[in-house]
Amino acid sequence: MIRGLYTAVSGMITQEAKQDVITSNLGNSTTVGFKQDNLAIRRFDDVLLENYDKVVGGKNVRNEIGTLSLGSRVDSVNTDFTQGMIQDTGKPTDFAIDGKGFFTVQRNDGINNGQYYTRDGHFHVNMKGILVNDAGDSVIGRNLATNQLEPINVGDGKLTSDVYGNISINDNKAYKLYTVDFNDYNSIKKIGDNLYQGNNAAENNAVVKQNSLEKSNVNVINEMTNMITTMRSFETNQKIVQSMDETLGKAVNEVGSVR
């Protein structure tokens, strides 16, 4: 009975975690370049059930009944990096990566050399003439004159880009967007603000589309279906816990009581 309680409660905890992931996906279904998460669930190790009811040669011997699952637990949260739809915006500071790769931005926080990665190409030029994202982080590019990585300085010039991310300012080639990719996508972690951290980032020649943005890859209909399924599973485990609690209450308070 107690094992059954633990099993049902572990199911409730798992379904609650899954609901949090689904809620995050739905809440970011309109976020530019957002990649949906999926919850990986694994079960606890099975336990062996046995008794000594089997009689052999007039003696009780060990009898293996079988195994019993003790429920489920959260294994990991994995990000789905499949391509989102690319939508034209007509805005010259909007960029989308078609295929693999990430934009690189710089944040003055002293962590990871200040470099982070994103699929969100919704950029704008700040008051200092620097190309930045919505959080104010500088977009990094390779200066074609010095071959150094630095924030892209647009000034008050006209910005244009080709499909390889070569940026021209007033029709003069000045920068190349510093896009990177990873061999191991499992090393990439979300840190908030639609940014990622990752190990061993390598520069790549991503296909870049100007005047465009990549939409979220969240399928709202699928997530709503998953939400309903998760809620029903949670309610089922909740009813099991309530039923077992009532049964245990009767066993403690009524069974064997002297009237």
Image (spheres, rainbow, N blue to C red):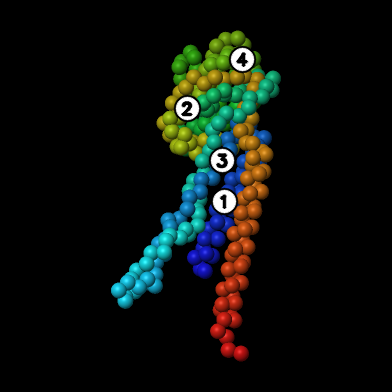
Amino acid at the residue labelled 2: Asp
Label 2 environment density (alpha carbons within 10 Å; few <14, some 14–19, many ≥20): some
Amino acid at the residue labelled 4: Thr
CA gap between label 3 and label 2 equals 19 Å
- Counting residues from the start of the chain, the first of labels 3 and 2 encountered is 3
- Counting residues from the start of the chain, the first of labels 3 and 1 encountered is 1
Q: Which residue is more in the foreground, 124 or 156? A: 124
Q: Quickly name the residue at label 1.
A: 17
- Counting residues from the start of the chain, the first of labels 4 and 2 encountered is 4
Q: Quickly name the residue at label 4.
A: 160
Which secondary structure lies at badge 2? strand
Q: Position of residue 195 (x, y in %)?
A: 55, 35
Which of pointers 4 and 2 indicates the residue nearer the eye? 2
- Counting residues from the start of the chain, the first of labels 4 and 1 encountered is 1
Q: Position of residue 246 (x, y in %)?
A: 61, 72
Amino acid at the residue labelled 3: Asp
If the image is split into quadrants, where does the C terminus sit?
bottom right
Q: Quadrant of residue 23?
A: top right
Which of pointers 3 and 4 indicates the residue nearer the eye? 3
Which of pointers 2 and 1 indicates the residue nearer the eye? 1
| Left or right of 220 in this view: 257 | left
Which secondary structure lies at badge 4? strand
User: Across the whole image, how many numbered discs are drawn on residues?
Assistant: 4
CA gap between label 3 and label 1 equals 12 Å
CA gap between label 3 and label 4 equals 34 Å
Q: Which disc is residue 181 wearing?
A: 2
Q: Position of residue 220 (x, y in %)?
A: 66, 38
Marks 3 and 1: CB-CB under 8 Å?
no
Residue at the (57%, 28%) spot, across then down: 83
CA gap between label 4 and label 1 equals 44 Å
Which of pointers 3 and 2 indicates the residue nearer the eye? 3
